[in-house]
Amino acid sequence: MQPFSAIDQAAAIDARDIAFVVFPGMALLDLAGPLQVLSWARASENDGLAYRIRILSQSGGVIQTDSYLTLETEPLLNYADHAFDTLIVVGGDGVYLAEKDQEFVDGIRTLADLSRRVCSVCSGAYLLARAGCLDQRRVTTHWEDIDILRKDFPDLHVESDPIYIKDDHIWTSAGVTSGTDMSIAIVAEDLGHGAALSRARALVTYMVRPGGQSQFSPVLERQRRDAEGRFSKLHEWISENLQKDLTIEALAEHQNMSLRSFHRAYQTVMGTTPAKAVAAIRLERAREMLETSSLHMKAIAFQCGFKTEEHMRRSFLRQLGVVPSEYRARFQMLEKGDRSWLEQ
């Protein structure tokens, strides 16, 4: 991968400068996702490129990623006096060796102090924390690195659930692909919602995910439990037919199993009953719709297969401790950085 000079710089004369900070052993996707979003972002089809990209490492030159590919980088110290619009520190297993290089850490702090916006992807938060950029901040990182970040930096407010968090001018994101979500949100903040949607469509992204969404996917958890895929088709069918009366008899019939055998097998594999699984999938869909749409509660309840709006309300109270309207309000407050509801 070449420095930005390999791209059409003439189209980005008035662009904002963005620096990615990398190191040997970095996770390639931590860089590739955000880089793909930001490299070709523009306010409209008639505008030039919005960002000018630099990829920096401690000494410059070629570095090895955690994958097959290598990267051509520029020396970080070459830009020690440069005020970047956005600084993005990537993650990867090499971060715990990189953070022992005090000159590298100090260089990151220097760039961060001059940058309008400072970001991390995955365990890149550890480098920002070591550089003193995250003190007293709300932050997140990959779920595998949550405990060590909390242990080594007790003054940080480390949250394990969100896919990314914005605290003033500091942005941190969870593992790997969440860096893409954060970058799309950055485009939205800089260039508008339309520009962000345009990048998401170009990347064939399923949806623009708000930062308050969880990095822990119930779908992946079901797939983890059902490693052999015995009930994967059933779960797809449930998700596509939430408005139907999904009785255990209907589920067993779909699996071509007797009622007794199905109930026993499902509970053994999935660790829950079929009825509770259906209720969980309905709740997941309702949460997603509350987070990403402005549909009326009654419409959401209908589309998710709840018998009534009150039925959905009771389900939210039982599982989440809040009613749907309060869940939507809290989610929107979290997205805006307002955490006052946590004190209630």
Image (spheres, rainbow, N blue to C red):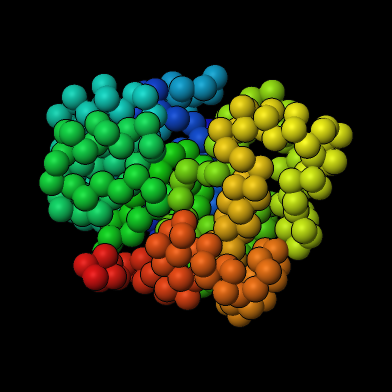
Q: Residue at x 45, y 24 (%)?
A: 65
Tell me the quadrant of the picture where the C terminus can be found: bottom left
Q: Quadrant of residue 245?
A: bottom right
Q: Quadrant of residue 311?
A: bottom right
In the rendered view, would you say 220 is above or below 306?
above
Residue 277 appears left or right of 216 = right
Q: Nearer the viewer, residue 255 or 193?
A: 255
Compared across the picture, whether 156 is left or right of 262 comes to left
| Residue 218 to residue 309: above or below | above
When the figure is inspected, residue 159 is found, relative to residue 292, above or below; the finding is above
Which is more toward the observer, 78 or 16?
A: 16
The reply to whether residue 218 is visible in this rendering is yes
Residue 144 picture location, percent across and down? 37, 31
Q: Position of residue 157 (x, y in %)?
A: 21, 50
Give how far across and how far down residue 343 sits, in percent: 21, 67
Residue depicted at 58% across the width and 29% down the height = 225
Question: Which of the two residues, 300 or 128, is positioned nearer the viewer here?
Answer: 300
Q: How many marks?
A: 0
Point out residue 308 in the picture as x, y percentages from the top left corner: 65, 73
In the visual, does 246 lie left or right of 161? Answer: right
- Which residue is painted at 28% across and 56% down in the image? 170
- Look at the picture and state if 104 lies above or below 183: above
Q: In the current view of this chain or complex, which residue is farthest to the front? A: 260
Q: Nearer the viewer, residue 8 or 145?
A: 145
One can see residue 82 in this view? no
Q: Residue at x 33, y 59 (%)?
A: 166
